[in-house]
């Protein structure tokens, strides 16, 4: 865009926005040009609407001027999907100031919430009614970001991911430019046609800017029991998961796998942390059972968990050792793993998923591929074993050639997708860092549908920093 038209666009935007809605100086732009692990690019400017109407006005003006932009929430993502391109022509539309509405309906067990609120905000307000939005993450993403990426987390086995917990959305479309979609009724049942929630959930912000949502809430647990269990093998961990589900049923809330190297890293990194076992196990699991029913009912979740553990210890060889402790102490270790591993040096990360029945085999073969490409790698994997997810994170020597990393990544993704029918991006979504693999593995019907949707919603390719169709 030439300077004259750029100046006219800025003036038109400024005339329609509230104060502090536009940032143009380099120092102000810097925080919006990077995400949790990626430097991103260079923004032409940052636009920070405070309402849906301001968002609609921004989108209308940007589209009319033929200007590219990317929507951004809390920038906690790990695939650079919400950061600007490197040529300093793309605007960032930040939803951080979209915080004008957060209303809990305790009878319907829902919250209507603006996209700029964080997960912690939702749970703080919902908690006043004995409710929660049970997406459990180490990060604190925005509501809009969680919808765009279909966030999962550690308790997906009990509550599902974001897709299962979005009951309504409001969004601004690129075509027609600035038109507002109103789908906020918050109904649990509505078979009257197209579901806008599904259009916007898990599609990485490709089809519009979510400005508000209705989220399903769940009762806060009144009881919680947690155990860290050292297991004889990863195969044994999977068997334990099946056993726990058979014994504790719907009370099973989480079942997380943690390698010995990962838990050692967390203990060493976290102030005051102590290894729960006499020595770090080769592999362990964090198992949690919860209930919204209080102990005054006669139900004792702690007793149920302990009874199951004792039975396993008596009848099988799957458990090497087990520690039952306060949930916050054990979850602190689990949530501290990612940052702890990152502090060890140059980290390479994978976000894989396979069916639970094939988890152990995928993990073993993937680790073999790691050492085949980088003999000196230190694998510190962990993940959501209950849903087949594995964060295959590792530390590699700082002088490891980029080509080596690329070849290793390709080999592990080929193994996961082609041989195990798994996913190369279980939770993180699609962004510039893995768009090439989307094009590599997506089948033709999927690509064709994505292309058709992109052409309908964004025919001039103005929204986002990667194309999926």
Image (cartoon, rainbow, N blue to C red):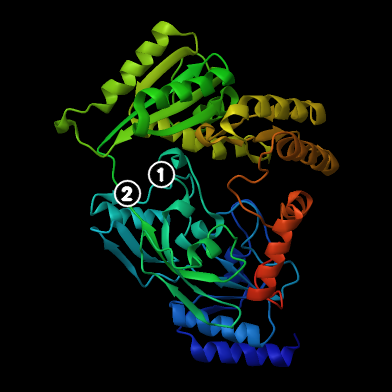
Mark 1 lies on residue: 159
Indicate the quadrant containing the C terminus: top left, top right, bottom left or bottom right. bottom right
Q: Which quadrant of the view contains residue 249?
A: top left
Of 121 and 182, nearer the camera is 182
- Residue in the picture at 27% in, 59% down: 108
Along the horizontal axis of the image, is 239 left or right of 402?
left
Q: Residue furthest left?
A: 296
Residue 65 location (% of width, % of height): 67, 87
Q: Which quadrant of the view contains residue 382?
A: top right
Of 79 and 174, nearer the camera is 174
Of 436 and 402, nearer the camera is 436
Residue 221 location (% of width, % of height): 28, 40
Give the CA separation, mark 2 to mark 1.
Answer: 8 Å
- Residue in the picture at 57% in, 71% down: 208
The answer, for residue 140, to whether it is visible in the render is no
Determine contact: label 2, label 1, CB under 8 Å.
Answer: yes
Q: Earlier in the sequence, mark 2 or mark 1?
A: 1
Mark 2 lies on residue: 218
Along the horizontal axis of the image, is 15 left or right of 466?
left
Is label 1 in a helix, a strand or a loop?
helix
Which circle marks residue 374 in the picture?
A: none
- Residue in the picture at 79% in, 50% down: 440
Label 1: few (<14), some (14–19) or many (≥20) C-alpha neighbours in 10 Å: some
- Residue in the picture at 53% in, 27% down: 263
Q: Residue furthest top?
A: 314
Indicate the quadrant containing the N terminus: top left, top right, bottom left or bottom right. bottom right
Is label 2 in a helix, a strand or a loop?
strand
Q: Is residue 376 above or below residue 60?
A: above
């Amino acid at each position: 865009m030439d300077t004259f038209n750029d100046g006219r666009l800025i003036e038109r935007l400024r005339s329609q926005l509230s104060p502090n809605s536009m940032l143009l100086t380099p120092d102000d732009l810097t925080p919006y040009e990077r995400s949790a692990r990626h430097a991103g690019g260079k923004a032409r400017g940052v636009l920070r609407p405070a309402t849906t109407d301001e968002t609609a006005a921004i989108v209308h003006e940007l589209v009319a001027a033929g200007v590219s932009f990317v929507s951004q929430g809390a920038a906690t993502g790990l695939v650079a999907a919400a950061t600007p391109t490197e040529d300093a022509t793309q605007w960032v539309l930040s939803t951080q100031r979209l915080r004008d509405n957060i209303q809990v309906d305790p009878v319907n067990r829902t919250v209507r919430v603006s996209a700029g609120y964080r997960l912690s905000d939702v749970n703080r307000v919902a908690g006043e009614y004995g409710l929660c939005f049970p997406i459990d993450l180490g990060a604190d993403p925005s509501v809009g970001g969680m919808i765009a990426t279909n966030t999962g987390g550690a308790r997906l086995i009990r509550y599902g991911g974001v897709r299962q917990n979005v009951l309504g959305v409001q969004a601004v479309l690129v075509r027609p430019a600035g038109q507002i979609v109103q789908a906020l009724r918050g109904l649990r049942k509505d078979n009257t046609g197209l579901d806008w929630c599904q259009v916007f959930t898990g599609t990485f912000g490709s089809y519009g800017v979510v400005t508000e949502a209705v989220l399903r809430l769940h009762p806060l647990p009144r009881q919680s029991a947690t155990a860290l269990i050292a297991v004889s093998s990863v195969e044994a961990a999977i068997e334990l998961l099946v056993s726990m589900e058979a014994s504790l049923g719907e009370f099973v809330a989480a079942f997380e796998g943690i390698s010995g190297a990962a838990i050692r890293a967390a203990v060493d990194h976290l102030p005051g942390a102590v290894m729960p076992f006499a020595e770090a196990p080769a592999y362990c699991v964090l198992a949690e059972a919860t209930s919204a029913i209080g102990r005054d009912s006669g139900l004792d979740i702690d007793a149920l968990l302990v009874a199951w553990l004792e039975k396993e210890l008596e009848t099988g060889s799957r458990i090497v050792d087990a520690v039952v402790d306060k949930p916050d102490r054990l979850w602190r270790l689990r949530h501290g793993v990612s940052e702890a591993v990152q502090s060890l040096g140059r980290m390479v990360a994978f976000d894989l998923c396979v069916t639970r029945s094939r988890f152990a085999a995928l993990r073993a073969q993937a680790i073999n591929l790691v050492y085949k490409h980088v003999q000196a790698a230190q694998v510190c994997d962990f993940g959501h074993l209950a849903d087949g997810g594995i964060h295959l994170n590792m530390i590699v020597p700082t002088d490891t050639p980029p080509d080596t990393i690329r070849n290793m990544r390709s080999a592990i993704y080929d193994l996961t997708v082609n041989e195990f029918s798994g996913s190369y991006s279980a939770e993180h979504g699609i962004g510039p860092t893995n768009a090439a693999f989307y094009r590599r593995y997506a089948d033709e019907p999927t690509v064709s549908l994505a292309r058709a949707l992109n052409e309908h919603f964004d025919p001039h390719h103005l929204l986002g920093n990667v194309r999926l169709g």
